[in-house]
Amino acid sequence: MNFEIAKEKAIKYIGISKKTEYEVVTKLKNIGVSEDIIQNVICYLKDLEYINDSDYVDAYIRQCMRLQKYSIFEISQKLIHKGIDKELIDEKLSILHEENYEKDVVERLLEFKLKDMEDMKIRQYLYRRGFKYYVGD
């Protein structure tokens, strides 16, 4: 497969929704594109700012904050799974620590989803979801 075809396939893939560099590389590998062409396509897409992992992380965190249902740990794990560098994730997630994001999410969960559960079940639920904050503590 040549550069032009690989580039078109990558752009079509990105056109559906924002993707990370890792996701684009994985997609191109899965359709049989050679490493050299993949690197050229990635450079091309980065030059045009079609893929930018830093912007992707910012958008993903904003979306999670809007939904208010994920712990910081869950957000971090989902981003790692998408191939984002751990240092970039930690840098970007620092804002959530400053804004008491987890406290707000836990309070919201307690108000709606967990309001009829006993204390031990609530603690177990929050622990499994990766929350470090609990209002009862």
Image (cartoon, rainbow, N blue to C red):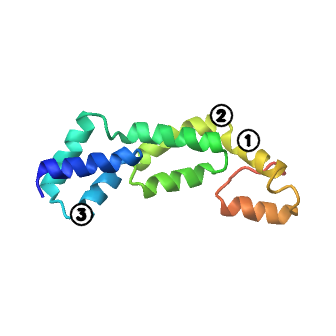
Q: Residue 26 vs residue 120: left or right?
A: left
Q: Specify which label sits upstream in the sequence, 1 or 2.
A: 2
Q: Position of residue 63 (x, y in %)?
A: 56, 41
Query: Residue 24, percent across and down?
Result: 31, 52
| Callout 1 amino acid | Asp
Where the N terminus falls, by quadrant?
bottom left
Q: Is residue 137 visible?
A: no
Q: Pointer 3: residues within 10 angstroms few (<14), some, or many (20+)?
A: few
Q: Which residue is mark 2?
A: 99
Q: Is residue 57 above or below residue 110?
A: above
Residue found at x 55% / y 50%: 75
Q: Amino acid at mark 2?
A: Glu
Circles 1 and 2, Cβ within 8 Å, touching? The answer is yes
Q: Nearer the viewer, residue 126 or 59?
A: 59
The image shows residue 25 at horizontal and vertical percentages of 27, 55
| Cβ atoms at labels 3 and 1 below 8 Å apart | no
Q: Amino acid at mark 3?
A: Ile
- Name the residue carrying label 1: 104
Element assignment for label 2: loop
Instruction: Say few, some or many: other residues with alpha carbon within 10 Å of mark 1 (under 14 / 14 to 19 / 20 or more).
Output: some
Q: CA distance from mark 1 to mark 2?
A: 9 Å
Q: What's the mark number on residue 31?
A: 3
Label 2 to label 3, Cα distance in Å?
42 Å
Q: Counting residues from the N terminus, which is met first, the one under dot 2 or under dot 3?
A: 3
